[in-house]
Amino acid sequence: MIKKILIANRGEIAVRIVRACAEMGIRSVAVYAEADRHALHVKKADEAYSLGPDTVAGYLNAHRLVNLAVATGCDALHPGYGFLSENAELAEICARRRIRFIGPTPDVIRRMGDKTEARQAMIAAGVPVTPGSEGNVSGLEEALAVAERLGYPVMLKATSGGGGRGIRRCASADELSKNYERVISEATKAFGSAEVFLEKCIDDPRHIEVQVLADHHGNVIHLYERDCSIQRRHQKLIEIAPSPQLTPEQREYVGNLGVMAAKTVGYRNAGTVEFLLDHSGNFYFMEMNTRLQVEHPITEEITGVDIVQEQIRIAADLPLRYTQADIQPRGFAMEFRINAEDPKNGFLPSFGKITRYFAPGGPGVRIDGAIYTGYEIPPYYDSMCAKLIVWALDWESLLARAERSLRDIGVYGVKTTMPYHREILRSPEFRLGNFTTSFVEAHPELTAYSVRRPPRELAAAMAAALAASMGF
């Protein structure tokens, strides 16, 4: 069994992995840039080592991370999500240095990271894909010809893209011409590749993803689906498991598609197969994420499976502890990404010091976070500072528990997306479980909320202002 893991990440996901290690009797090693010296993952891990003063470079240096794993006596490395989690070179370096990489093999990371190659693999497996270009387009002229054949609107996508970057919807030849160089530039800067391809745009779809687990003994199962349709500019805001929008037949069908996709590419470890669902009930493969997803906790809540622990077991060559028949989803779970952003000001980041923090509690409530009173959110990373996860036996109870939990939690000193989440919960359309990826854009009025500060916060603000005016 694995005895010591270096966590090549930061923030809430690093804290999540530390907790899984502690329950398994595995020592955890944290890494941090100077901006993260006082971060929660540094405090929680068994050991912690500096990556130097640069705020980002250390987290992106695969050789340095693996060298540190070797030097500290680790026998495995967990990449979390983001940073190098889908970097085939990191997995290769781990293999050369005899460090177990907690994720899929390098060749699968490469194949699924290349969107056109992933499409071809799914077509060969009989998994439905969105109509699109045969491969990467050679230039704007070919892109325009393909778009004419597919019919507008089309999606122009970076072949190595992810996380909502390197993608544009083009409703006409003029829009495609204007966006082409922009996507090329964005893809080159973000992913180091200028390759792009085209897909027919599925207007107003639902975004459904399937969580899969696969071991080294030929066992592949799915843990049912998550609905990630509530998103802004391709960035997820709220996720739900299972989807309140699927029939039992659709649920079984898309789950089997996820397993089929994983088996086709020889997948190992935890992964997510993402689909678009159109208004006619057709599923289309979108991409496969070869890593742990931000939203994995809601799947854990409805299935009782600790996905991070399963990742570690798989990396240790152990078989899955579950068969497909063992996985029986129970109830509904919802995750709110609590971002340090101001929804009333175009979701502008709101970094700074958290003056006070109160965690919610009660049955069916979970917080995966990396914040505490006095913690200063650095401006160098993603704005997500915590995830609120709620579970209940039925949809109506879930909505009630979610509203209560969002009232319970308190994050002061920075603006967050929590008031906006409360507005979404009050939306009749959302409460009916009837929403698509265009929900946020279709409801700009939801950002017009008023913030009612509780008396204790008003009193604290007035006391601070009085003290400042008197020179204290």
Image (cartoon, rainbow, N blue to C red):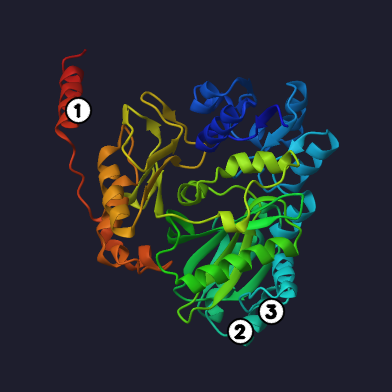
CA–CA distance in space, label 2 to label 3:
14 Å
Three-letter residue code for mark 2: Leu
Residue most extreme to the front:
325
Q: Secondary structure at mark 1?
A: helix
Q: What residue is shown at x 68% (from left), y 66% (from top)?
A: 260
Q: Nearer the viewer, residue 429 or 171?
A: 429
Question: Where does residue 432 sit, x and y in percent of width and height?
Answer: 30, 67
Instruction: Tell me which numbered mark, 2 or 3, is placed earlier along the sequence.
Output: 3
Q: Nearer the viewer, residue 401 or 32?
A: 401
Question: Where does residue 431 sit, x and y in percent of width and height?
Answer: 29, 63
Tell which tag, 3 or 1, sits nearer the viewer: 1
Q: Which mark is residue 150?
A: 2
CA–CA distance in space, label 3 to label 1:
59 Å
Question: Where does residue 103 sit, x and y in percent of width and height?
Answer: 69, 45
287 w.r.t. 127: above or below: above
- Is 1 situated left or right of 411 in this image? right
Q: Which residue is mark 3?
A: 141
Residue 80 appears in view = no
407 w.r.t. 41: above or below: below
- Is 268 situated left or right of 337 in this image? right
Q: What residue is shown at x 47% (from left), y 70% (from top)?
A: 248
Q: Give the quarter of the image for residue 195.
A: bottom right
Q: Secondary structure at mark 3?
A: helix
| Image quarter (top left, top right, bottom left or bottom right) of the C terminus | top left
Q: Which mark is residue 461?
A: 1
